[in-house]
Image (spheres, grey):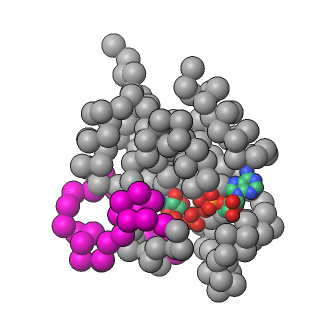
Amino acid sequence: MPSQKRILVLVGASGSGKSTVSDLLIEKGIPKLVTSTTRKPRPGEVNGIHYHFRTIEQMTEEPFIEQTTYASNIYGLSVKEVEDKLGKYDMVHVTLDKNGAKVMKEQFPEETKIIFFKITEQEMAERMKKRGDSIEAIEHRIHFSRSTEELEPVENTDFVVSHGTPEEILHQILNEFAS
Ligand SMILES: Nc1nc2c(ncn2[C@@H]2O[C@H](COP(=O)(O)OP(=O)(O)O)[C@@H](O)[C@H]2O)c(=O)[nH]1
Ligand SMILES: Nc1ncnc2c1ncn2[C@@H]1O[C@H](COP(=O)(O)OP(=O)(O)O)[C@@H](O)[C@H]1O
């Protein structure tokens, strides 16, 4: 029998709107798989809600489905997070880079739906500026996304979102996957 469970994987460059849409999905009752990172919290980010903020040592202390290094920080999705939330809910979402999306498609081929947030380099810079990122952080991220072709859709993308307000994008996603 086909699995009824769904994992919506949000992928896109820095500033493409993943976190904004993630917050709206949570409001709609579609919980987030909270990943772990060694990155420092941004203003307003809460430990356990936006990320589990960890030291490098702590990233070796539990099993992970996958880990990636992105712009000099380590990120990872723990086995516990997936087991706990997928056990409780039919649909969850998670924000990952392209490496993480690939692993999820391999590990959970039936459940995983990859949603790619398309954005131009100019929009990316403007959005990060609006979010309050420093010039150094913006330049570092842009350089990184050029070198990793992050602005190009990832392999096995199921759905591409590009234009619209965060609310419009939310509705596109719900129409596609929550009906
Ligand atoms: N593979 C993988 N990627 C992650 C994980 N957690 C977050 N990411 C991705 O890491 C990248 C950097 O995230 P973040 O530092 O929050 O920066 P942002 O994209 O500017 O919001 C984004 O592409 C996230 O989707 C994870 O556990 N595994
Ligand atoms: N669809 C959108 N249109 C215009 N601005 C947006 C949109 N989505 C997000 N933003 C703004 O762009 C900035 C970066 O968004 P964010 O969700 O933090 O991106 P990401 O998580 O992909 O790095 C924020 O200031 C946010 O308010």
Examine the rendered structure and indicate whether residue 57 appears above or below residue 25. below
The furthest residue to the left: 61
In the rendered image, residue 26, in percent from the top left (x then y), is placed at 50, 43
The quarter holding residue 50 reads bottom left
- State the image coordinates of residue 129 (x, y, percent, origin top left): 72, 74
Q: Is residue 61 magenta?
A: yes
Judged from the image, the quadrant occupied by ligand 2 is bottom right
Is residue 75 shown left or right of residue 122? left
**Which residue is located at x 67 percent, y 33 percent?**
171
Q: Residue furthest top?
A: 1
| Residue 164 is at least partly visible in this image | yes
In which quadrant is the C terminus drawn?
A: top right
Span shown in magenta:
45-71
Counting from the top left corner in percent of width and height, residue 35 is at 38, 57
- The location of residue 149, given as percent across then percent down, is 64, 62
Give the side of residue 28 with respect to residue 105, left or right: right
Question: Dividing the image into 4 quarters, which one contains the N terminus?
Answer: top left
Q: Residue at x 64, y 77 (%)?
A: 133
